[in-house]
Image (tube, rainbow, N blue to C red):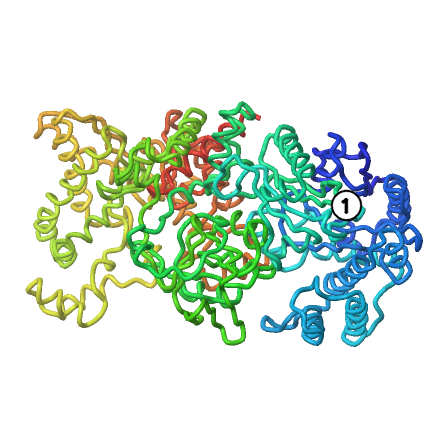
Amino acid sequence: MSKYVYFFGGKTADGNGKMKELLGGKGANLAEMCLIGLPVPAGFSITTEVCTYYYDHGKTYPPELKAQVEEALRKTEQVMGAKFGDPKNPLLVSCRSGARVSMPGMMDTVLNIGLNEGTLRGLIDKTGNERFAWDSYRRFVQMYGDVVLDLKPQSKTEIDPFEKIMEELKHERGVHLDTELTVKDLQDLVKRFKKAVKEKKGKDFPDEPMEQMWGAVSAVFGSWNNDRAIVYRRQYGYPHDWGTAANICSMVFGNMGDDSGTGVAFTRDPATGENVFYGEYLINAQGEDVVAGIRTPKKIAELKNDMPPVYKQLEEVRKALEKHYRDVQDIEFTIQKGKLWMLQTRNGKRTGFATVRFAVDMVDEGLITKEEALSAGRLPPDDLNQLLQPIFDPNAKRQAKVIAKGINAGPGAATGVIKFFADDAEAWVRQHSKTDAHGNRDPNGRVILVRRETSPEDLRGMQAADGILTAFGGASSHAALVSRQMGKVCVVGCGALQIDYGKRTVTVGSTVLKEGDFISVDGFTGEVVAGQVATKPSEVIQVLIEKSLTPEQSRVYQQYAKLMEWADAARKLKIRTNADKPDQAAQAMAFGAEGIGLCRTEHMFFDHIREMREMILAETPEDRRKALAKLLPFQRADFEGLFRAMKGHPVTIRTLDPPLHEFLPHDDKGQAEVAKDMGVSKEKVAERVKALHEQNPMLGFRGCRLGIVYPEITEMQARAIFEASCNVAKEGMKVEPEVMIPLVGFLPELKAQAKIVRDTAEKVFAEKGTKVPYLVGTMIELPRACVVADQIAKEAQFFSFGTNDLTQTTLGMSRDDYGSFIRVYLESDLVPKDPFQVIDFEGVGALMQIAVEKGRKTRPDLKIGICGEHGGEPDSVKFCHRIGLNYVSCSPFRVPIARLAAAQAALEGKK
């Protein structure tokens, strides 16, 4: 018989911390905390297999489950000394979700299960606290009505129906706080809640405890496939078939008076990485009060004064958990009548700044090894990106109008237009999603999501926003937890904000900001500024690129540098950069690039567009050569600059790739201007534009086809490359040019172009009286090239995968036009990831593997790299390592991310 239920309680447990796939992270860690002797309320976990069964069998349960649950419930009753459903000595339980990875707030929880009019009387007699008991009952009816019975707001502007009833009652009684309601008020509130359930759901609120528990279990399993959970899994690449566990845990109460409380804490600061106990608590409250952010809690250090013995015990728990798990822990606890209970521990979500500091500090402390510090589970490569993002310019900020200050929950600097609702934020960002020619986003398309407090339903808007600002909540609120994981700038608990969703305004004193106005948030200080604030580069950039800081002046840089040193020692893949100009190359070198994997020569031509147009308009080879002779010195100077900047590292230069029509204007005014500038008729320009027009330019007259039809173009480019190489070599610098022929599908194409390159090289070497080593290879970007790679390798000395075009030609999907449908594909799970961001491993990746195997069968020493946009994406970098590439090439600012991903790939390959 399958075991579906695992008990934990006292100092024993059926499971342990390694059983996350079966028990979920929460259940596994509750079991583990029992085993290491921490105070955990007894309970049991219903496994993830039951969740899978539930969906596979029409939302029903395995036949043997009921008996296993009843047996585990009896054990729980024995440990806790109370009985579920007993009117004299009632045991109350919670039902919490728990996937194998932490998904904070994405699924549902129900507390105080087992309460009804009968058990309520027993709870009053047992505790001697009638107000506490009725407060627990109203919380239960409210939460169960929301989560299980689905009595929720029907629109984004509607107030929660239970909150509306409570606000009406408080208004009638002339009070402001929940704690000011009397026992009689709470009794009235429960009646009103139950009446609303009956009126809106057409059925009575359930009183039978087992019915309540099974309703909660079904709601928890049902929440695995709610919209926010699906969006969250999709964002982080978690499979939808994992399922969640349901954890039934004995209730302990933080709302029994001033000697009780509840809190959430991290064993170190998850925002900055500082080694301090970081968290919050509320006196006389239940757990959801802290996370929901409805009341702004106290800092954990204040517990030392409020409850000294409990604080001392928590400090001991903090040290024990870090030593045991060897990672920063996010814990939830409740204090009931002065006794500490641990409700949860999990690896804490953290910012990129904290991630790096945790890793470095823990190695220095001897808690983990360097290899463990580099692991993807501790250090997602994209987290490094946060260390490279801009910060507010102090001078600009001093002149700005600071209107409020909250709790800094997610570091960084963010400026954007105010949006109050998640769907509006998402729509606005999508509407302004196009980038300019340099890849920069429209500044008007940046959003700050401004909320009273966030909930899991806001996830899509939080993803879209650059920054998140809330009026309520603390450093452990939903907004803080989720924004840290996403790497978003976040300020919470900014109590001065008066947010009116109906009018769509936020007011601070006399300042009123409307939706669409700009606002800025500083995630380092918690300050909120009206309007836009100029930014300046991060500390890492100031050290590496601007040289405005020394390494000694920046702790952040020192930690980053140490981590990169460890990564470089572990990785096998070389990391190159895509760069066309010396300043880009110098930036990439500062970030640790070991060569240029792609220099796009067409970008250089745009700087000398007149001469380029003269060449295109030429009608004979002789006229073309004359125009090309004017371009030659420009190309040569560009290449000299690149060779000098790269200081002897290899430089891969792609010969002209885009179709010629891209260099000519397509409007009448532009054509008239070119005609006047060139001294030709407007008709001649228009005729040439018409002649070059193509129905499908991506598959048209471009790449090696240009050099085959106009060999003089390849000849000029080769001459510029080798003259520059010889000139720089004569200066005493090592030079390693690699000439890459694009869009090759047939071996004869490559042979024809390679002959021009090699013949030109010999001529230049004879003229200059010196030689430099060089390679001639090709860009693999067509499926045919992959399939016949063994033939192409007879001529090519290296391959470089152009995965942008290889993805287009393999999938039959244009990256310029796929935006109209890719979102639907992703949200319908038709494709796991955007194939232009992450390599399509099964399709495009399979072709790459064929090319590697076939190419090296012909030429065992074939150098192979990748120069598409995928070269800086961590999962794609790891794939390149697995199939045996020599290097990846990416944009300069992705170089650190690629270095770390390459190290992780090498370490994962050893396991």
Q: Is residue 233 left or right of residue 586?
A: right
Task: State the image coordinates of residue 873 (x, y, percent, origin top left).
Answer: 44, 43
Q: Residue furthest front?
A: 305
In the image, residue 800 sits, relative to residue 911, either above or below, namely below
For the C terminus, the image quarter is top right
Identified at 65% across, 44% down, the residue is 306
How many dots with numbers? 1
Q: Nearer the viewer, residue 399 or 206?
A: 399
Query: Which of the pair 111/70 is nearer the observer?
Result: 111
Residue lying farthest to the left in this orientation = 679
Q: Which residue is mark 1?
A: 337
Q: Is residue 832 visible?
A: no
Callout 1 environment at 10 Å: few (<14), some (14 to 19), or many (20+)? some
Residue 690 point in image, percent of width and height: 23, 66
The residue sitting at 66% across, 34% down in the picture is 312
Q: Is residue 152 left or right of residue 375?
A: right
Is label 1 in a helix, a strand or a loop? loop
**Vertical order, 188 against 576 (above or below):** below
Q: Amino acid at mark 1?
A: Lys
Q: Quadrant of the N terminus?
A: top right
Residue 458 showing in the rendered view: yes
Where does residue 789 sit, x and y in percent of width and height? 40, 36
